[in-house]
Amino acid sequence: MADPLVRFEGVRKTYGASGPAAVQALDLDIARGELLTLLGPSGSGKTTTLMMLAGFEMPTAGRILLEGRDIAHTAPHRRGIGVVFQSYALFPHMSVAENVAFPLSVRGVSRAEREERVRKALAMVRLEGFADRRPQQLSGGQQQRVALARAMVFEPPIVLLDEPLGALDKALREEMQLEIRHLHQRLGVTMMYVTHDQAEALTLSDRIAVFEGGRIRQCADPRRLYDRPTDAFVAGFVGENNLLPGTIETRDGEDCIIRLACGPVVAATAADCGGRGESCLVAIRPERVAVAGVTASDLGEGALPAILQEAIFLGDHVRLRLSVGDGGEILAKRPAGVGTLPEPGGPAAIAWTEGAAFAFRPPPARV
Amino acid sequence: MGRAVLWAAGVLVALFLLAPIVAIVPLSFSAGSFLFYPLPGLSLRWYQDFFGSDFWLPALWNSLGIGAAAAALATVLGTPAAFGLWRAKGAFRAVAMGVVLAPMVVPVIVVAVALLLAFGPLGLVATHTGLVVAHAALGAPFVVVTVLASLEGFDPVQLRAAAACGAGPLRAFFRVCLPQIAPGVAAGAVFAFATSLDEVVVALFVAGPAQRTLPRQMFSGLNDQISLTTTAAAAMLVAFSVLLLLAVSWLQSRSRRRASG
């Protein structure tokens, strides 16, 4: 990236003198106009990263550059960055219009211009008729839109969103995801978005940085992150995955032959794994697992015998739980009403296309 | 049965607390000249006496003036102190809290003697300024406590939001925090005013003839000659206190309504 808007350089954050690092050795660039999502479980360092960019946490080491200027120790109100908080944090003693006007009045924008920009900002989030309401009189989704308008009205170089949809119900959350995405596309404003919801990250983002244990495990666009995870954690966290332990029998470049702990021998592409004799995890997406009745030959060579344990009907698709070999379990997904299924408890055969299975180094055991 | 006992005990406690205050009020309307029941008749003569007197009227104005100034000073000092304590953590907070709240716990007579000794070299004894400063010191802890209580209902993320909007700490305090805790600040000011209004010990020590307050005058009025004008003054102090109490509870219900949205 030639000219990133924001650059984290070797940023580290520890709490207390000897505490574990909340963020360790973070290097991350945010390009102008992109929507970058920090995705990870709680305690992975994603919110700390956002708070350091907003200025509410000071990095222990490293530099944070905004438009080439080191702002790591600049006071938050001098950074000119827009922030949308999880709890909205609207000012309850001000009307909607006063809330949105606040960043402008702080900057000494004239009254006439202020009114015009507030009107535009409220139109942008489709809240034209709500200018004189109090935040408490609005629904959660409307409050969130006011918070968005307030964070964007002063045209900051970047807007940070900290789990902004966490408090909304599922339907509203999905609606707001699209709204934020469209807002981003229409205005071209750079956004950094924090969430623990991988579906939300996939919906919204130009790029996703997956955090775990204070580190970025992988940073890529949604498609690539889903199709070619480079790390067992990412494979398991983004979308669903079967993760089967095994041992590498042979490795030739990217092509591995792996003996699964449950018995069968399978082929997989090396994503991040060692060589012959080393243990690994084989990842296969459930939707890539084809399942057929007992005539295993239908699935061609490489099909594995399995036993269908359970079929769960979920409307648009069916989830199949199958046992393989000695104690192995594989989850498969297929569209509902396609083909015929073996009886639960009956024998089946499973297979996947070449290139659907990836081998990873097993994550270090957690203490 | 148990309920009846509980009620009876409650009524007795209320009587114990209120009877002396209630008893003094009718006496102020007595037509006679002695602290004596039954009243020989009703009249407003003691109130006439009060409002026509060079002894009482200046004291009333002193009480109101000094009370208002002391309350204002205590509020201006106590509110930022409460805000600082609210943001502080750990041992420092505990120590600072102890220092700020000390005037509430230390016996008033000790404070009075200490102030007299401290004010002497500063030339503050027997001045309005001296009494205002002394009463402000006594009232400030009440401001700190009530403002701290209202800050409990204030979301600290609001300050971050203000900063993200570009507001510096001072502006964030005045435009975002203060309006939301205003009922608590006002209640603290009322408490500080009430503290000054009924304060007599410090007034006895540091006030000169020109700063005599109502309680101070009642004290000497009782010593010199038992005039029922004193009861009129007492009745008016009671009325003031009731009004202040109502003001505080109104402010508190306002801040609760605001907190619940």
Image (cartoon, rainbow, N blue to C red):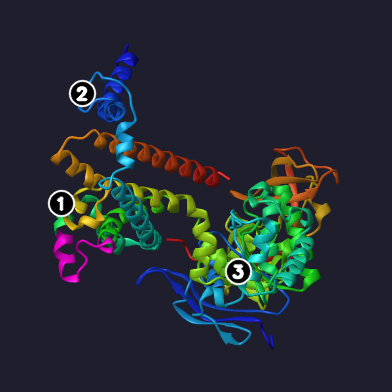
Q: Residue furthest top?
A: B1
> Which amino acid type corresponds to the residue marked 3 in the rendered image?
Cys
Q: Nearer the viewer, residue A60 or B76?
A: B76
Q: Position of residue B140 (x, y in %)?
A: 32, 56
Q: How many angstroms separate mark 3 from mark 2 (CA)?
A: 68 Å
Q: How many angstroms separate mark 1 from mark 3 (CA)?
A: 50 Å
Q: Position of residue A195 (x, y in %)?
A: 62, 61
Callouts 1 and 3 close, C-beta under 8 Å: no
Q: Would residue B7 appear left or right of B218 to someone viewing this image?
A: right
The residue that disc 2 covers is: B36
Q: Which mark is residue B109?
A: 1
Q: Position of residue A39 (x, y in %)?
A: 62, 64
> Which amino acid type corresponds to the residue marked 1 in the rendered image?
Ile
Q: Which mark is residue B165?
A: 3
| Marked residue nearer the N-terminal end (3 or 2) | 2
Q: Would residue B5 appear left or right of A263 to someone viewing this image?
A: left
Chain part drawn in magenta: B114-130
Q: Position of residue B155 (x, y in %)?
A: 50, 55
Callouts 3 and 2 close, C-beta under 8 Å: no
Looking at the rendered image, the disc whose residue lies closer to the viewer, 3 or 2, is 2
Placement of the C terminus of chain B among the 4 image quadrants:
top right
